[in-house]
Amino acid sequence: MSVIIITGTGTGVGKTVVTAALAALAAADGSAVAVVKPAQTGVLPGELGDVDLVRRLAGIEDVHELARYADPLAPVSAARRAGLPTLDLATVAGTVRDLRAEGRLVLVEGAGGLLVRYDDDGSTLADLACQLRAPVLVVTTAGLGTLNATALTLEAMAHRGLALAGIVVGSWPAEPDLAARSNLADLELLAARPLAGAVPEGSGQLDTQRFRQVARASLEPALGGTFHAGRFRARHAP
């Protein structure tokens, strides 16, 4: 996979930390990797954004924030309130293709969920994935409500013919409750494949070296790690 789109089942699910984990493992294994954030919202000029967190955690410098809007809203709404142009996803796709053409693995982190709008025509991250013919990694939550949100995301992907790169729990709790432990098997049923990873909560606070170790243990071999879904599920069986 030369391009991976990273989306979430909502906001605050751990997309940025999962993106950083993918980048950290690729870089540690000797691959050239770039991270693209098409639109950063909810961050003022001069403040640190998602790509800055990726830079710190993964220890890479090839990060690209293509647009920034101060209000914590969907990109199209934030752009409208700021009186700024909305993001042109065709231009974003061109940037990603240019990075890919130079031999990089390109990780594209969306804003919010798969169908959050970027412009007044209703363009979404799903449309960008279609343009790039890129697989989508879905980051979800562990607990109550995740099954419906994940199922809706997967259904939207299937409707558009998008390939699933895997499902990762973006913040696995230190003390998972019954819902979280039960959801592991159900998430795999929804995806019709083993879970692709589970990143421990608080991983975004680690230093680069420790984060790389945690990332390795938290993502499946196809994503550069050593995570084994069956063993993880058995360890947390309700």
Image: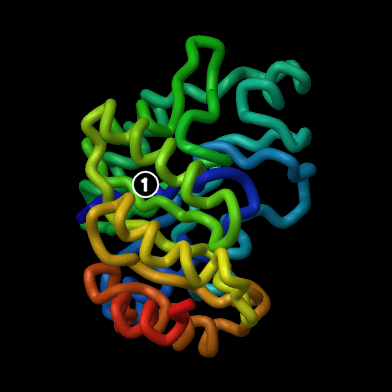
Residue 26 x, y percent position in the rendering: 32, 71
**Number of numbered markers:** 1
Q: Position of residue 189 (x, y in %)?
A: 30, 55
- Up/down of 62 relative to 5, above or below: below
Q: Quadrant of residue 196?
A: bottom left
Q: Is residue 221 visible?
A: yes
Left/right of residue 191 with respect to residue 18 in the rendered view: left
Residue at (62, 46) in percent of width and height: 11
Secondary element under disc 1, as helix, strand or loop, is: strand
Kindly give the residue lying farthest to the top in the view shown: 121
Q: Is residue 222 above or below residue 111?
A: below
Task: Determine the image quadrant of residue 215.
Answer: bottom left
Residue behind mark 1: 5
Residue 143's place in the image compared with 10, above or below, is: below
Report the side of 228 relative to 112 (left or right): left
Please tell me which residue lies in front, 18 or 186: 186
Amino acid type, mark 1: Ile
Mark 1 closeness class: few <14, some 14–19, many ≥20 residues within 10 Å:
many
> What residue sits 37% from the left and 24% below the top?
90
Nearer to us in this view, 197 or 214: 197
Q: Position of residue 231 (x, y in %)?
A: 32, 84
Percent coordinates x, y for residue 132 in the rendering: 26, 35
Left or right: residue 3 versus residue 176 is left
